[in-house]
Amino acid sequence: MHWPKLTSDKIKKRIIEALTKNVNYRKTPILGVPATYLDPEVFYDDAPFLNNAPFLSTLIANPNHIGCHTLGGDTEKLFKGTQEIEKELIKLCAEQIFYGNPDAQDGYIASGGTEANIEALWIYRNFFIKQYNAQPNEIALIYSEDSHYSLAKGSNILNINSIKISVEPTNRILNLLELEKKTELAKANGIKHFIVNMNLSTTMFGSVDDIDKVTMLLNRKNINYKLHVDAAFGGFIYPFSNPENSYTFKNPYITSFTIDAHKMLQTPYGTGIFLIRKGYMQYVRTTEAQYVAGTDHTLCGSRSGANAIAVWMVLHNYGSEGWKTKMQTLVDKTTDICYQLDEIGIRYFRNPYLNIIAIHASGISGSVASKYFLVADSYEHEPQWWKIVVMPHITRGSIDSFISDLKSEIKIKQRN
């Protein structure tokens, strides 16, 4: 896991060079493209600070990265300069963070983790249909009850069956006995092919599914499956805080990953990342997109090239070692909060390699949770858990204030 830290001058130079390889709406006679630079009446294109702002310069230039550029062959050549940076970014994430073999993965910058997750389901549904002549009602998606709602959304959109597996309430471990029983029942009811989602950090709890135990069970039961990893939250932190793990492309049972740069990387929303082994994007090629060079393989279609630039800039601003240090700082700060919760007897769940703490509702009032904008596991029913996410903006003062309020509540309870 290594990529270089670049100076701000080198980052700026790389982006400006890429923009010069894109077509320039002001200098090139472009008559057939239904797009242009951002409206200069609203978005000033001659502000002096833009000379030192490569991301904002890219926003104003407005490159469209429609399509999947890692596939090679024909692509929209108007924006080949910034497309190259997106290809570099996909390669970095797949090979340096998830240890994929060189040039063995495809991917693109998606609108977010939801789109990337649904892209995976869409690919695997079509894979089973085209390779096994499967009917949609013979395909089922397996995911845990703690999984992101995009899985339920995706199965609904794609009209495939859902199999939701419960977790143990205290440690959030996937119920393997239930997984075995439900897959056996599904096979008995005509399900022949399975899409399996594994969580590299659930949204609410920061729990990580035991992928080795799950794949061992599925293989023992001769289940025909494709496995996707939802690492939207954990993808940019867990591989750095716990490098010896099974969530890499070295694991032969993993076919794809979702990661979200707009979480840990602090990039703009719209910077989800989809990674998949080569040979699978073809199953969602939209042949009707004849007017797009190379057609389209994504859910979103047109998308801003500036988002790829933002992620590339952040990763190269830190380099791999700098990024590891930043993520470890968040983990350490989370551990410190947990020590203080232990001291005052607050019940919580936390994966030691992540920066999420789920506090049981018995240990905190709704008023304190609301004061610090904690997130409930449900807003339609009485919350059972309240979530803290330790992000870079959280200061020592806000942590101390939070712990102080919890202590005050405990004292009041004891007096009563």
Image (cartoon, helix red, strand yellow):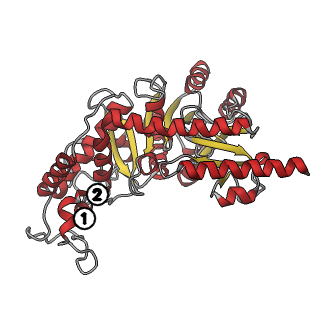
- Left or right, 200 with respect to 41, comes to right
Task: Classify mark 2: helix, strand or loop.
Answer: helix
- Residue 273 appears in the picture as rendered: yes
Do tag 1 and tag 2 residues touch (Cβ < 8 Å)?
Answer: yes
Seen in the picture, residue 237 relative to 1 is either above or below; the reply is below
Seen in the picture, residue 290 relative to 189 is either above or below; the reply is below
- Residue 149 appears in the picture as rendered: no
| x 40%, y 54%: residue | 299
* x then y, percent, for residue 391: 50, 48
Amino acid on which disc 2 is placed: Ala
As drawn, the label of residue 306 is 2
Q: Nearer the viewer, residue 188 or 117?
A: 117
Along the polypeptide, which appears first: circle 1 or circle 2? Answer: 1
> Which residue is situated farthest in the top direction here?
220
| x 73%, y 33%: residue | 168
| x 47%, y 31%: residue | 241
Q: Nearer the viewer, residue 302 or 10?
A: 10
- Left or right, 150 with respect to 404, comes to left
Q: To which residue does mark 1 refer? A: 62
* x then y, percent, for residue 33: 20, 68
| x 25%, y 81%: residue | 41
As drawn, the label of residue 377 is none
Q: Nearer the viewer, residue 4 or 69?
A: 4
- Left or right, 40 with respect to 156, comes to left
Amino acid on which disc 1 is placed: Asn
Q: In which quarter of the view is residue 28 placed?
A: bottom left
Seen in the picture, residue 170 relative to 215 is either above or below; the reply is below
